[in-house]
Image (cartoon, helix red, strand yellow):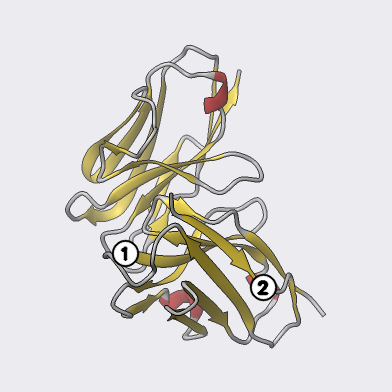
Amino acid sequence: EIVLTQSPGTLSLSPGERATLSCRASQSVSGTYFAWYQQKPGQAPRLLVQGVSSRATGIPDRFSGSGSGTDFILTISRLEPEDFAVYYCHQYALSPLTFGGGTKVEIK
Amino acid sequence: QVQLQESGPGLVKPSQTLSLTCTVSGGSISSGSFFYNWIRQPAGKGLEWIGRIYTSGNTLYNPSLDGRVTISVDTSKNQFSLQLSSVTAADTAVYYCVRDREHWGQGTLVTVSS
C-alpha cells in the first residue's frame, strides 16, 4: 500500500499569501495518477487537480499541482477567503487507492 | 450534469450488514468508461477508499476491509450499491459514492450502534 504523508499538518496564512502544501509517497507513484482535493466542513471533498497538474472543471488557476515520483506539491498562488479548508492528496495508481491525512489551511 | 445521491439506513447494529445505494442522475451508469467508488470518512478523520466497480462490472476492494465488502450495480435503476458485513463501531463514518474522482454524492452518515 502506498502511504501518503502530508505536511505541514496545519498552515496558518493570511489572505493574499501563497500556500505550498506537500505530499510524500512511501513509494513512487507511477504515471500521473495523483490528485488533490479541497474539503470544507460538512461538505464532500471537491476535486481540484488530477493527473498531477490538470485542474478540474471550474477550478481557478491560482491552484496548481506539480511533482513526480514520491514528492508532490499543491500551490495556491494567492489565498482567497474561500480557500481556507482542509486539503487531501490522493494516489490512484495502485490498489488500494489511498489518501493523505490532510493539511488544514487556516486564517492567521 | 452528473449527480450522485446516497441512500440507506443511518443506524446499523453491530455484526449486521450495512447497505447503501447510490443513485446516479444526468447520465447512464452503463455508458462510458467510469469507475464508481465508495469512500468513507469517520468524523474528524481522513478519507478511506472502500472499493469500486467499473462500467464493465469489474470490482476492486480495499483489502484492509478483510473481505467484508461487496459492490454491485443495477443498470435498470441507474444505481450502484455497497454492502459491508459484520460491522463494528469502527465502521461508523460518512459514506460517499463517487464517480471517478470528480463527481461526489453529498455523503450519508452511518452509525453502528446497538
Where does residue A31 sit, x and y in percent of width and height? 17, 53
**Residue A48 at what x, y percent from top left?**
39, 38
- The residue that mark 1 highlights is B34
Write down the quadrant of residue A105 in the picture: top right
Q: Amino acid at mark 1?
A: Phe
Which numbered marker is on residue A105? none
Whichever of callouts 1 and 2 sits on the residue coming sooner in the sequence is: 2
Q: Are marks 1 and 2 on the same chain?
A: yes
- Within 10 Å of disc 2 (Cα), the crowding (few <14, some 14-19, many 20+) is some
Residue A79: image location, x then y, percent = 48, 19
**Which x, y percent locates residue B12?**
73, 78
- Left or right for A66, reference B10: left
Q: Which residue is mark 2?
A: B8
Few, some or many C-alpha atoms within 10 Å of disc 1 (few <14, some 14-19, many ≥20)? some
* Disc 2 residue type (three-letter): Gly
Q: As rendered, which of B109 and B41 lies closer to the eye?
A: B109
Residue depicted at x 19% and y 55%: A30
The quarter of the picture where the C terminus of chain B appears is bottom right
Q: Secondary structure at mark 2?
A: loop
Answer with left or right where residue A88 lies relative to residue B54: right
